[in-house]
Image: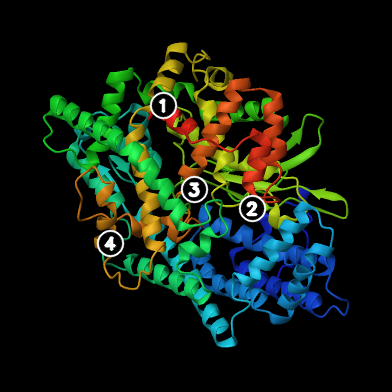
Amino acid sequence: MIKKTLLTPFKTKYNTPPFRIIETSDYLPTITEAIKMAKNEIDAIVNNPESPTFENTIVALDFSGEQLDRISSIFFNLNSAETNEDIQKIAQEVSPLLSEFSNDITLNEDLFKRVKAVYDAKSELNLTVEQTTLLDKKYKGFSRNGANLPEDKKDKLRDIDKKLSQLSLKFGENVLAETNKFEMLITNEADLSGLPEGTIEAAKQLAESKDKEGWLFTLDYPSYIPFVTYADNRELRKRITLAAGSKAFKNDALDNQDNVLQITKLRHERAKLLGYKTHAHFVLEERMAQTPETVLNFSNELLEKAKPAAQQEFKNLENFAKELDNIDRLEKWDSSYYSEKLKQKLYSLDDEKLKPYFKLENVINGAFTIANKLFDLKFEEIDTIDKYHDDVLTYKVTDTNGKFISIFYADFFPRPGKRNGAWMTSYKPQYIVNGENSRPHVSIVCNFTKPTKSKPSLLTFNEVTTLFHEFGHALHGMLANTTYPSLSGTSVFWDFVELPSQVMENWCFEKEALELFATHYKTGEVIPMELVEKIKESATFHEGMQTLRQLSFGLLDMSWHGQDPSNITDVKAFETDMFKNTSLYPATKETCMSTAFSHIFQGGYSSGYYSYKWAEVLDADAFEYFKEEGIFNKTVATKFKDNVLSQGGTENPMTLYKRFRGQEPKPEALLRRAGLI
């Protein structure tokens, strides 16, 4: 039976998702019914007897299907953060329905005729910049997705889209199942040598929770990362590293090799059908970079600068491992371990020394304090709205005058039903209708170290920057102030979306900011100045190797999507060939990156992984401006809020950036920060 309450604006405080009353069995019938409702709204636009206008066609289209968007966003967010077999089964049924509905819109000739009529009259309509952007986006949404195709090709497109939605879900399910399947139980205490006390305690607790004797390690980041970074037992580091690197690459029921080949071939076929040379040409038309050539030139230029530094860093690391432990050949499972040892030697900086200063609650409050100083936001934890899991924290966000800005959800710890990594998402966009500014509901999801019986959740410095990164995305969503939902918040060009997130990471390295939240969880002592200096000094440690690694992922993505993949039959061989120019460590036959590269085969980063580096150029340049004027300078912060964070996708991102910065970004800022010049 359909719960009618899910098909109308939720009668909850702030119109938040009523998680408490939603049962898994509600999703399929509710989404099916919401699709019918949305179809009726589309029919009403098509059958409107009045001539097409911007309001009755373009605006009506943008606001159509609101309840479908809301219920499907709840469902797919849970499929990432709190899934189970039933939800995954429903996802396989629901995805083709949504894909079909999306095609029903973009391939609807009568609807396209109305959109085109408004588009063709654009010059006479006296539209605002935001309205012009919306009209262009709607028109391209049709033309770029098959509206001009003959009927037989439209059917072909529908078929491809349906298959792609199912393959991408299957890809993600396999990666999650592989992550959950691996367990390494240690029963000999000597094998724990080198591991931090907190990691050992967490592994003990995990084993106990599964009625096992000993210490249990998994591929969840808070378990995996400390193990490969600190465990002295090289064989065990090898075992867990190979397990992580061979996810969905074992020629069994959870193998993703065929999924990778099918996804890339179908994407290419789809692009050709729509008149594009490759999937990358299709995607990049709607990015700041615009063409694959630009991306490759950008990547190769950075590669040229980073590679000599990376090779020298690798050589130094090899020499260090040989001196320390007589290691003849540095392998992938030695990377984090010896890097950490060398970092400790060079900077006397150990993540374990830093962790006591980064209690999770303090770091959250630090992010809130910084947002308050920069953007006048206040965060109040509330318990008056539903949450989908007890771990989730819920906040009401207001400005300093008490005006409601947003609802904010934060979900920090690993669970079996949650995929690895960290991300920001939204349960409701911001928009203005009938003069009322309807505010957004934003969420960040991470996988941080859980509290143990004796310690609170203490973050590594890397986890601190991850929290600030996702919080930057969240600010982009929270501070949205646009009229139309499809242009709101993070609905921007993909190579611009990482600017707000990456720029926020910079505050983690600044004394003025660290003093606001980095206090010892036992003594309350503020982080000592020498540790702050060491954090700053070590910020460029192995930057060449890190840059090379990041560029290699972006180039792998472009290799899959920037050419015709029809003749590729061996995923591993293709990948190995692709990595020839960027690999430092010896190849391992058991591992494969592509089969678990969720960003490009499950997330939205296909032909877009380069955007992390692209946005680093923007963020380094933007933060230089903050540093010139003071990192809490209100004028610069307000310019950033007014021209970037609040504007969503209302204008070309370079226009917005230049309005904030007064100039185009200069790559020198990034190279300076990275210590590469």
Say if 531 sits above or below 324 in the image. above
The amino acid beneath tag 1 is Ala
Identify the residue at image location x=62%, y=42%: 474
Q: Earlier in the sequence, mark 3 or mark 4?
A: 4
Dot label at residue 611: 3
Q: Is residue 582 visible?
A: yes
Dot label at residue 574: 4
Mark 4 → mark 1, Cα distance in angstroms: 34 Å
Say few, some or many: other residues with alpha carbon within 10 Å of mark 3 (under 14 / 14 to 19 / 20 or more): many
Tell me the residue that label 2 is attached to. 491
Q: Earlier in the sequence, mark 2 or mark 3?
A: 2
Is 430 on the left or on the right of 597, as rendered? right
Give the structural element (helix, strand or loop) at label 3. helix
Identity of the residue furthest to the bottom in this view: 152
Disc nearest the viewer among 2 and 3? 3
The reply to whether discs 1 and 3 touch (Cβ–Cβ < 8 Å) is no
The amino acid beneath tag 4 is Phe
The percent position of residue 106, horizontal first and vertical second, equals 65, 74
Q: Nearer the viewer, residue 592 or 543?
A: 543
The percent position of residue 661, horizontal first and vertical second, equals 64, 33
